[in-house]
Image (cartoon, rainbow, N blue to C red):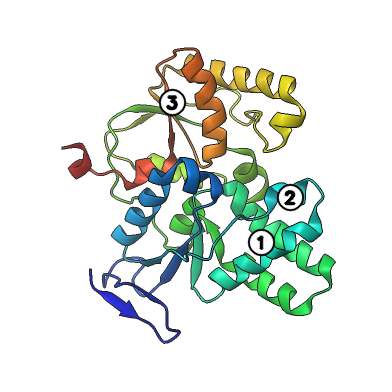
Amino acid sequence: MTTTTNSSGITGRAATPGLPGAGLDVAVFVTCINDVMFPQTGVAVTKLLERLGCRVHFPKEQTCCAQITTNTGYFDESMGMVRSYVRAFGDYDYVVSPSGSCTAAVRDQHPMLARAAGDKGLERDAEHTSKISFDITEFLVDVLGVTDVGAYFPHLVTYHPSCHGLRLLHLGDRPYELLKNVRGMTMVDLPAKEQCCGFGGTFCIKNSDMSATMANDKARHVRETGAEYVVAGDNSCLMNIGGVLARQNSGVKAIHIAEILANTEEDES
């Protein structure tokens, strides 16, 4: 692909005409945990979006979504991160993230923090970025209008709907619609799938015993499916579930949904 610069001065790789994302400047909000621990997920999101024709960008100014500090009650300390987000992402057509948790923070908490600060300009900017920010699965289905992304993953998998995606973003069947069109893959339903995995950010620290019990319950249900992989839309949940499965020597691997959707037959050859 060649590089192009649009009328707003945004430079990125050129889109492919005729594809669902042609003409769209899409920024990837990779999130802290993916940047530090799961960079392959960000690579997968970029690969997937480019395959669908988007001009993909990675603003280097991006930082934390401020969810942890906000949840802990440190509103003043969170404001710098909200300002950073609107500066980094405000000029793009869309912002796409491989995290329902962080996307929910941007949508629900950023406008609330701006209102609490009494900053009308920031409130306006936060409302704008909250409206253009999407979880990867809802962006594919709702914005690009695709459920078959040309993926191939010849394995038996089960899907865990993480809490923020399920309860705050209301992703519903979108992840399932995308997964059921993956070639070569067999899906098996996860028992008690709507139960939390026990991570919950600071919850797993403040309520460690309860968190461990919940994670063990989730891992037990995953093992009951006989799946090779447990897939979800948040690597924080997958880290929690996958850690238990690894300590149990279960052989079940944790994988982000974007990594499955980005995989093709060429990758397997």
Residue at left offset 68%, top offset 70%: 127
Identify the image quadrant of residue 210.
Answer: top right
- Badge 3 element: loop
Mark 2 crowdedness (10 Å alpha carbons): few <14, some 14-19, many ≥20? some
Q: In x, y percent, where is residue 119?
A: 79, 75
Task: Name which of mark 1 and mark 2 comes first in the sequence.
Answer: 2
Identify the image quadrant of the N terminus.
bottom left
Rendered-image quadrant of the C terminus: top left
Q: On the rendered structure, is 232 left or right of 121?
A: left
Instruction: Identify the mark nearer the N-term, 3 or 2.
Output: 2
- Tell me the number on the disc at residue 188: 3
Q: Which mark is residue 81?
A: 1
Q: Are marks 1 and 2 in contact (CB under 8 Å)?
A: yes
Q: Percent x, y for residue 240?
A: 57, 28
Residue 140: % across, % down: 43, 56
Q: Position of residue 73 (x, y in %)?
A: 82, 49
Q: Give me the C-alpha separation between circle 3 and circle 2.
A: 37 Å
Disc 2 residue type (three-letter):
Thr
Q: Eyeballing the image, is 169 above or below 240?
A: below
Secondary element under disc 1, as helix, strand or loop, is helix
Q: Residue at x 45, y 41 (%)?
A: 38
Is 48 drawn above or below residue 208 in the view shown?
below
Residue under label 2: 69
